[in-house]
Image (spheres, rainbow, N blue to C red):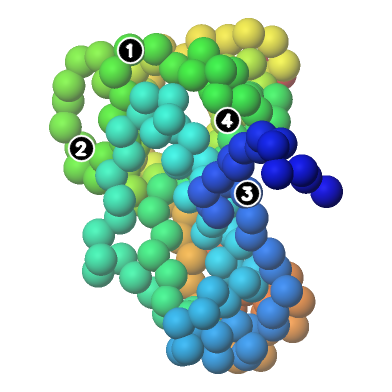
């Protein structure tokens, strides 16, 4: 296709931003995990979804603390280390420019609760869902919130210390819901998420 004098370039993108797949059932995924091969199952896709959103926040200037090693849990034969569960809806932002524009000042997502003026702080156990034209400044979060708006809204100086975490736990052996069986775990605490709605 190319002549010897043709010029070309290569763009390299981190796998976390460019590729993940859900193609293996829990048993096959666990076998691959034992062999050191990516499990490529529903659970790892969900983990990578949260991780990619956290990386987008890092690029936007948000400092994110990794979850501690002792946070690792075994679900259906695969070890997971879920940190903060960050969901960025398309209406919040898709491009780096859009996401950067939604945060002001210095930002820090951490595990511990400390009071530092001018920083956004989110514990590694927290869940943050951002949906719509929401602008964040000075958020302290140790719990779970969902912020929704259908117009431009600023959320400033909000502190949530409810510790209403959404956590993943193993499913029962008799679980029949295929959406849970394919993961090997289920979420508890979703009903306690605090909704901040401007809709």
Query: For the view shown, which residue lies furthest in the front direction?
Result: 4
Q: Are marks 1 and 2 in contact (CB under 8 Å)?
A: no
Residue 171 is at least partly visible in this image: no
How far apart in space, not on screen, are marks 1 and 4 (Cα)? 18 Å
The residue sitting at 39% across, 54% down in the picture is: 83
**Which residue is disc 2 drawn over?**
113
**Which residue is disc 1 drawn over?**
105
How far apart in space, not on screen, are marks 3 and 1 (Cα)? 29 Å
Q: Earlier in the sequence, mark 2 or mark 4?
A: 2
- x and y, in percent, of residue 41 in the image: 64, 73
How far apart in space, not on screen, are marks 2 and 4 (Cα)? 21 Å
The residue sitting at 58% across, 68% down in the picture is: 43
Position above or below: 76 against 83: below
Secondary structure category for the residue under label 4: strand
Of labels 3 and 1, the one closer to you? 3
Q: How many residues crowd around disc 3 within 10 Å: few (fewer than 14), some, or many (20 or more)?
A: few
Residue 95 is at least partly visible in this image: yes
How far apart in space, not on screen, are marks 1 and 2 (Cα)? 19 Å
Q: Nearer the viewer, residue 153 or 195?
A: 153
The residue sitting at 77% across, 43% down in the picture is: 3
């Amino acid at each position: 296709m190319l002549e010897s004098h043709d010029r070309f370039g290569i763009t390299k993108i981190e796998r976390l931003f460019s590729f993940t797949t859900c193609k293996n059932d829990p048993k096959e995924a666990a076998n691959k995990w034992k062999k050191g091969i990516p499990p490529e199952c529903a659970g790892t896709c969900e983990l990578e979804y949260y991780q990619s959103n956290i990386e987008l926040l890092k690029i936007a200037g948000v400092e994110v603390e990794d979850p501690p090693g002792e946070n690792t849990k075994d679900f259906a034969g695969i070890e997971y280390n879920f940190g903060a569960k960050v969901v960025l809806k398309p209406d919040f932002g898709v491009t780096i420019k859009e996401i950067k524009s939604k945060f002001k000042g210095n930002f820090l997502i951490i595990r511990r609760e400390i009071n530092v003026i001018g920083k956004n702080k989110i514990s590694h156990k927290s869940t943050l869902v951002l949906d719509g034209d929401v602008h964040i400044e000075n958020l302290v979060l140790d719990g779970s919130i969902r912020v929704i708006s259908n117009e431009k809204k600023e959320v400033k100086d909000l502190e949530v210390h409810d510790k209403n975490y959404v956590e993943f736990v193993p499913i029962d052996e008799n679980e029949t819901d295929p959406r849970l069986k394919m993961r090997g775990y289920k979420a508890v605490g979703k009903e306690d998420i605090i909704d901040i709605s401007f809709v």
